[in-house]
Image (cartoon, helix red, strand yellow):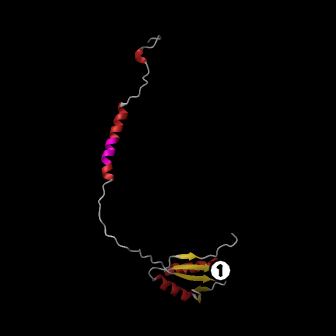
Amino acid sequence: MSFGAPDKDDDVMSEINMTPLVDVMLVLLIIFIITVPVINHAVKLDLPRAASQPNDVKPSHIDVSIDSNGVISWGGTAVDEQALKDRISTAAAQSPQPELHLRADRKTPYENVARLMSAAQTGGLNKIGFVTEPDASR
């Protein structure tokens, strides 16, 4: 142990060792050379051309309304519970299945709306939409 002047061998090396960086660069270059032809490989086909439109069959909808007294109207005609169940089962058998658009009066008790929704679900109608009036104050 000497406490004198530092030896020339103990100097800090201030150069970066370039050998590992060059090795990494060459490995990446080889990886890119191998993968680029695989990415651009495609089979070129001369496909026939035809003009066709997709068949968009939009399901019909059924308007059902409930007034504040609980009277149910199917398409504008008042129906009782048994007629409602019959119409729901015939509508559920259609393909594509129609959507049930439910219009309920503002003062209709929720129990009547829930009863109609339950009847639609047990009858097989799965698509139910609530129709509202737009708010004119906004």
Estimate the x, y position of residue 84 in percent, counting from the top left: 55, 86
In which quadrant of the rendered view does residue 116 lie? bottom right
Q: Identify the residue shown where x is 33% and y is 38%.
A: 26
| Quadrant placement of the C terminus | bottom right
Estimate the x, y position of residue 51 in percent, counting from the top left: 37, 73
Q: Nearer the viewer, residue 40 or 69?
A: 40
Q: Residues within 10 Å of mark 1 (few under 14, many from 20)?
A: some
Number of numbered tags placed on the structure image: 1
Asked if the stretch drawn in magenta spans residue 31, the answer is yes
Q: Nearer the viewer, residue 67 or 119?
A: 67
Circle 1 sits on which residue?
Answer: 105
Give the side of residue 114 with respect to residue 22, left or right. Answer: right
Estimate the x, y position of residue 90 in percent, counting from the top left: 48, 86
Q: Nearer the viewer, residue 23 or 77?
A: 23
Q: Identify the residue shown where x is 58% and y is 83%.
A: 64
Give the side of residue 55 with respect to residue 61, left or right. Answer: left
| Quadrant placement of the N terminus | top left
Residue 5 to residue 124: above or below: above
Asked if the stretch drawn in magenta spans residue 16, the answer is no
Give the side of residue 125 with respect to residue 43, left or right. Answer: right
Q: What kind of residue is marked 1? A: Asp
Give the side of residue 124 with respect to residue 135, left or right. Answer: left
Q: Identify the residue shown where x is 54% and y is 76%.
A: 128
- Magenta segment: 29-35
Q: Secondary structure at mark 1?
A: loop
Estimate the x, y position of residue 62 in percent, counting from the top left: 54, 82
Q: Nearer the viewer, residue 34 or 101?
A: 34
